[in-house]
Image (tube, grey):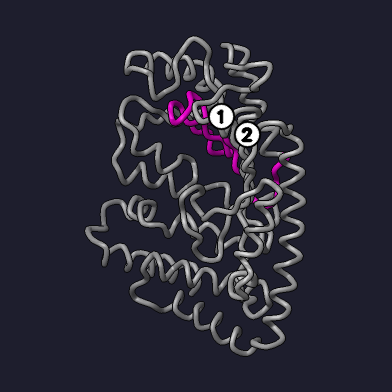
């Protein structure tokens, strides 16, 4: 969960995190969908020999519980599809460096780095460094015309997906998000929910990422997303300004009531927590709440999620009511 907080990085009021992911495949092996278990284990062992000496922990997903697997999704280290795969599949994790490598998801390798705030350039340099270590040991599948070869044609070319996770309450409450999404799509960008493709927006949190990997360089992708973030940031600030002019007293009341629920409620469900998060975060941004910092709030986007919360409880959670109570207790300790 280190990607939500960094002692050296001031928390951004709108940009929560930045992610860069490279899809790569080894020559001499079919794509994972056609790979038998013996060859799958062979690929994993080859990757392991490169990454373990670099400080990565090896986590075989056939050997962990569903709750543990779901927690890695909540931490954004693996995709939901990765947890459902049959056959050998492994996560290589270097948490202090914010690096994760999925072995045998849709491709042989999904190399990703998630950094706090707006840090796409740093995330890109980190994944390129790991890619170069892997490329030095075995040949990565590449075609002079198509670029990096990937199982899904939409990833051909750079094989790179870059994304930025933003908190956009003004545009959400103002009803402008559909317009923003349509405009971004004209530039080859897409807007998704908190867990990426196929997920819904929760807590006014969205991910902006590139749709196109071919015919564009990695640097161009980063520039395009950074430009989009700058434009969306301006639109968000204008939307917040308009809302503040007409509803400031109501917003103060709603945001401080949300903080009160965080401090005193006995049960808090996952969906309620996301609404509380949005209100308190909005209150911090508008200056309605000054006793809570984003550095305290944002880690809860992992720690208060169902699977991670269950693991943190060390067996005390037996049912959904227990989990809602544990979530409320977590909020009490942090904000009381």
Asked if residue 105 lies left or right of residue 209, the reply is left
Magenta part of the chain: 93-121
Tell me the residue at 41%/28% (across/down): 90
Tell me the residue at 60%/73% (across/down): 175
Residue 59 placed where, x, y %?
A: 40, 31
> Is 259 one of the magenta-colored residues?
no
The one nearer the camera, 262 or 204, is 204
The local crowd at label 2, few if under 14, some if 14 to 19, many if 20 or more residues have their Cα within 10 Å, is: many
Residue 212 placed where, x, y %?
A: 64, 38
For mark 2, give the secondary structure. strand
Q: Are marks 2 and 1 in contact (CB under 8 Å)?
A: yes
Residue 167 placed where, x, y %?
A: 61, 62
- Answer with the quarter of the image where residue 255 lies: bottom right
> Is 112 one of the magenta-colored residues?
yes
How many numbered circles does the render carry? 2
Residue 299 placed where, x, y %?
A: 53, 57
Tell me the residue at 31%/26% (across/down): 87
Question: Is 75 located above or below residue 108 in the figure?
Answer: below
Tell me the residue at 53%/22% (across/down): 51
**Residue bearing the label numbered 2:** 160
Give the numbered dot on residue 2.
Answer: none
The one nearer the camera, 44 or 287, is 44
Give the numbered dot on residue 23.
Answer: 1
The one nearer the camera, 244 or 107, is 107
Judge whether residue 5 can be spotted in this image.
Answer: no
- Answer with the quarter of the image where residue 271 lies: bottom left
Precedes in sequence: disc 2 or disc 1? 1
């Amino acid at each position: 969960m280190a990607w939500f907080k960094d002692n050296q990085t001031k928390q951004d009021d709108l940009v929560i995190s930045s992610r860069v992911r490279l899809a790569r495949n080894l020559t001499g092996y079919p794509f994972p969908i056609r790979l038998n278990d013996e060859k799958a284990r062979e690929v994993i062992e080859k990757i392991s020999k490169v990454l373990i000496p670099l400080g990565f922990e090896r986590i075989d997903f056939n050997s962990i519980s569903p709750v543990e697997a779901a927690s890695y999704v909540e931490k954004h280290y693996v995709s939901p599809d990765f947890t459902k795969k049959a056959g050998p599949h492994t996560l290589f994790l270097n948490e202090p460096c914010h690096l994760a490598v999925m072995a045998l998801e849709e491709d042989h390798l999904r190399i990703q780095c998630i950094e706090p705030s707006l840090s796409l350039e740093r995330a890109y340099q980190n994944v390129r460094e790991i890619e170069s270590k892997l490329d030095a040991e075995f040949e990565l599948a590449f075609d002079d015309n198509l670029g990096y070869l990937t199982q899904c044609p939409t990833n051909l070319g750079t094989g790179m997906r870059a994304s930025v996770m933003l908190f956009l309450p003004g545009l959400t409450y103002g009803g402008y998000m559909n317009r923003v999404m349509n405009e971004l799509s004209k530039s080859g960008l897409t807007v998704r929910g908190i867990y990426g493709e196929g997920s819904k927006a929760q807590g006014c949190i969205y991910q902006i990422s590139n749709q196109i990997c071919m015919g564009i360089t990695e640097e161009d992708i980063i520039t395009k997303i950074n430009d989009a973030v700058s434009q969306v940031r301006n639109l968000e600030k204008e939307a917040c300004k308009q809302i503040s002019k007409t509803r400031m007293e109501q917003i103060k009341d709603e945001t401080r009531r949300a903080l009160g629920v965080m401090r005193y409620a006995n049960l808090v469900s996952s969906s309620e927590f996301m609404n509380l998060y949005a209100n308190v975060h909005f209150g911090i941004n508008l200056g309605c709440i000054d006793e809570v910092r984003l550095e305290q709030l944002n880690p809860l986007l992992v720690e208060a999620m169902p699977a991670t919360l269950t693991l943190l409880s060390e067996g005390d959670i037996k049912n959904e009511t227990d989990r809602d109570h544990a979530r409320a207790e977590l909020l009490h300790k942090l904000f009381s």
